[in-house]
Amino acid sequence: MARPPSVRIVEVGPRDGLQNEPGVVPLAAKVALINALAEAGLTMIESGSFVSPKWVPQMADTAQVLAEIDRRDGVRYPVLTPNLKGLELALASGVEEVAVFAAASEAFSQKNINCTIAESLERFAPVLDLAKAQGVAVRGYVSCVLGCPYQGEVPVAKVVEVSERLIAMGCYEVSLGDTIGVGTPDKAKAMAQAVAGVIGVERTALHFHDTYGQALANVLACLELGIATVDAAAAGLGGCPYAKGASGNLATEDLVYMLDGLGVDTGVDLDALARAGRAITAALSRTPASKVAQALAAKAG
Amino acid sequence: MARPPSVRIVEVGPRDGLQNEPGVVPLAAKVALINALAEAGLTMIESGSFVSPKWVPQMADTAQVLAEIDRRDGVRYPVLTPNLKGLELALASGVEEVAVFAAASEAFSQKNINCTIAESLERFAPVLDLAKAQGVAVRGYVSCVLGCPYQGEVPVAKVVEVSERLIAMGCYEVSLGDTIGVGTPDKAKAMAQAVAGVIGVERTALHFHDTYGQALANVLACLELGIATVDAAAAGLGGCPYAKGASGNLATEDLVYMLDGLGVDTGVDLDALARAGRAITAALSRTPASKVAQALAAKAG
């Protein structure tokens, strides 16, 4: 296994990021963010979630977002669809890709979606069947892969098992989420290696939160396995309201800066990306949680 | 070359950190910080600088700091001494170790201390001679090892040359400073490897600023060379959010968290360290620039 020559970044700011911000962002700002991210060269932009607005008011306008963005050739705009109703709404919006979400921690599954991991996977079966019938690709997320806010340790074997089930059910890829950002490089690499060894490195993606400042170092360690898909959020948007102490995603700007320096191609224009991050954080009345964005702004200003 | 079983952390918060904060911290707060850092298990705590108070008012009370701290057995409290006068003041304060500071960038040397690199090294010669005669250890810093704000690229050969000169003049160790934090892991590792290949890995230390969020990943890469000394600042001190081009140090808390996770011993108690960082940032009226410190505070609160 060697470091990949290029990395596909899955930009999760408009969904995982904004969903976990305290404020609700106006529709126009979301549309502008997604268009700016595509303009910056990102080709996978998670754009919303079809979930009850009672639970996640920040995503209530996902259908309008999808209707108003400028869809670019070569760019995918997946959305989260936790159930069949969500998928039906997504299909009505003309999506080409959706995502489902399971936990590797029983305690987290119970607290977060009020069912066992096995039950949550059963719920996804009809979603995956309908998506397949409609020719819509499905990405799988596994949360708590390096620790759980409720049960602490999460066995690597459980992460592997859930990942394998998601692939068996029809997901084309599994994104491994360190939801509470507690992982460190050796543990992250060992976990990712165990999963990639079963589902294949080409089906394995990384989704590391930066709660303890470890996300970039963890990505660096996992790149050595040949993993070539990494999730990140512009300006380090978000966190997780259901995971106590969780903070934002790995900032896309900081990831791109590192990959540029390593000579790993991303196709992303860092300055354009940083502008997109500054615009959305201005709409949130705060500065970007990206060191690169802050440094570039200081240099410019 | 293999990752070291333990890392000696050189805590630079009270000097490199506070020196680059906009506010002047009261003497009592500095003394409390240094004592708390020693209490947390740090054994090398850079405690001040004997430099003109006209240039660095934040360090004007270094003699009083050294007089008032509780000196612990097994802990060293080095200070920066840019010239003979500084060393004489340091000796009068009973220090057992001092540090000198050269640049690997000609442009930076000219702008920062108004002389060539060669001239700056000549100035240090009497400092090193007197220190040797007095049995005082001297640490050497090299700045701009991965880039310069004035000249951009800095040749690795120049970093090696300056490091070698400092060792030849009598420094027991050279700390490689990425002053503006522009480095990425492969470049950091290649530079450190070139230096360690000449002066020895046991004489090579890392001093990476986190301007672009890369410091921890850079340390991770360099640990693979066997380098076992890393500089960091509690709470990421020195990263003033209001100053243009501000570039904080790697936060000691985030470094300790990673090393703990990697099973690399530091002898530092993370909770006690985080408390020290919170106390000094409270004195500066801001929150710690350490993700670990923020996460631990959120968990506790």
Image (cartoon, coloured by chain):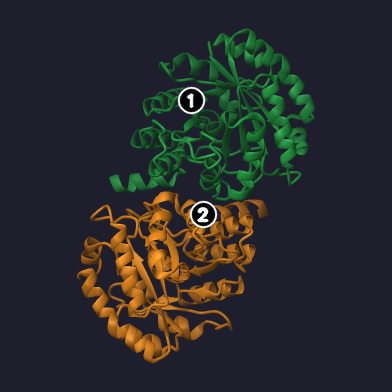
Chain colours: A green, B orange
Residue at the image position 64 percent from the left and 59 percent from the top: B263
Give the number of the disc on residue A113. Answer: none
Percent position (x, y) of residue A210?
Answer: 55, 45
Chain letter for the residue marked with disc 2 in the picture: B
Percent position (x, y) of residue B140?
Answer: 37, 73
In this image, A286 relative to B164: left or right?
Answer: right
Percent position (x, y) of residue A41?
Answer: 39, 27
Q: Nearer the viewer, mark 1 or mark 2?
A: 2
Q: Is mark 1 on a helix, strand or loop?
A: strand
In this image, A241 relative to B26: left or right?
Answer: right
**Few, some or many C-alpha atoms within 10 Å of disc 1 (few <14, some 14-19, many ≥20)?**
many
What residue would you read off at disc 2?
A: B220
C-alpha separation, residue under disc 1 versus residue under disc 2: 29 Å
Give the number of the disc on residue A44. Answer: 1
In this image, A257 relative to A188: left or right?
Answer: left
**For the residue marked with disc 2, what is the amino acid?**
Leu
Q: B158 or B141: which is nearer to us?
A: B158
Is B242 placed above or below A148 here? Answer: below
Is B293 placed above or below A135 here? Answer: below
Chain letter for the residue marked with disc 1 in the picture: A
Residue at the image position 21 percent from the left and 74 percent from the top: B119
Residue B28 visible in image: yes
The quarter holding residue B105 reads bottom left
Is A55 placed above or below B169 here? Answer: above
Percent position (x, y) of residue A36?
Answer: 39, 27
Do tags 1 and 2 sit on the same chain? no
**For the residue marked with disc 1, what is the amino acid?**
Met
Q: Is mark 2 on a helix, strand or loop?
A: helix
